[in-house]
Image (spheres, rainbow, N blue to C red):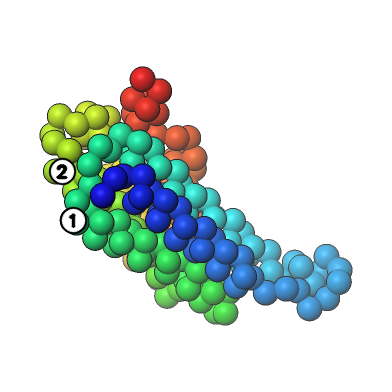
Amino acid sequence: MEPDRLEAFTDGVVAIIITIMVLEIRVPHGADLASLQADVPVLLAYVLSYINVGIFWNNHHHMLQLTERVDGKVLWANLGLLFWLSLVPFVIRWIDESGFTPLPTAAYGVVLAAAAISYNILQRQIIVVNGPDSRLAVALGGDLKGKFSLALYLAAIPLAFARPWIAGCMYVAVALIWLVPDTRIEALVKR
């Protein structure tokens, strides 16, 4: 299979995930700003989730630009990533239903951490197929940004049970770290 087909499939699934997220947002009951105020926290969670899904999609796109070959293991690793991303609308809905309480806030972190782990597995499988000297392997190097992000997610999960708002801030911090496209891959894509 060509990497282009894998990328097109992923694009379609991510588009569906984003669509489901927006369809899960409840419409305020009133027609004034006061009625919207109660929904601000879940709207912010939606914005954060949209950004997070977008970050995974963006990095996935760049990663596949450096990929020459994929195999069955890469396909399964990609499905693992998409599985975890598909749970983002579920945890957003759970947060909406119960508020930023400990368990849903921790579950949000579990989903993001599992997506990050799945993304890392996908990267490693692509490197196995394309070789240790492949463009992707060279671009990634030690992947400190990825490891640091995963460490923040993993630290935020238990912290959500003590201080959900701090865990939320850590989720935002990871998103801010990744808003700037990965320059390691960007440099090679431009060549």
| Numbered label tally | 2
In the displayed structure, would residue 153 be above or below residue 161? above
Horizontal and vertical percent for residue 34? 82, 69
Callout 1 environment at 10 Å: few (<14), some (14 to 19), or many (20+)? some
Query: Which residue is the extreme one toward the top?
Result: 191
Q: Nearer the viewer, residue 122 or 26?
A: 122
Horizontal and vertical percent for residue 106? 40, 68
In the displayed structure, would residue 30 be above or below residue 70? below
SS class, disc 1: helix
In the displayed structure, would residue 67 be above or below residue 158? above
Q: Which residue: 68% across, 64% down?
A: 40
The residue under label 1 is: 73
Horizontal and vertical percent for residue 187? 37, 23
SS class, disc 2: helix
Callout 1 touching callout 2 (CB < 8 Å): yes
The amino acid marked with disc number 2 is Val
First reached walking from the N terminus: tag 1 or tag 2: 1
Q: Which residue: 75% across, 67% down?
A: 37
The residue under label 2 is: 129
Q: Is residue 145 visible from the viewing direction of this image?
A: no
Q: Is residue 23 visible from the viewing direction of this image?
A: yes
Cα distance in 3D space between marks 1 and 2: 9 Å
Horizontal and vertical percent for residue 176? 49, 43
The amino acid marked with disc number 1 is Lys
Q: Nearer the viewer, residue 185 or 99?
A: 185
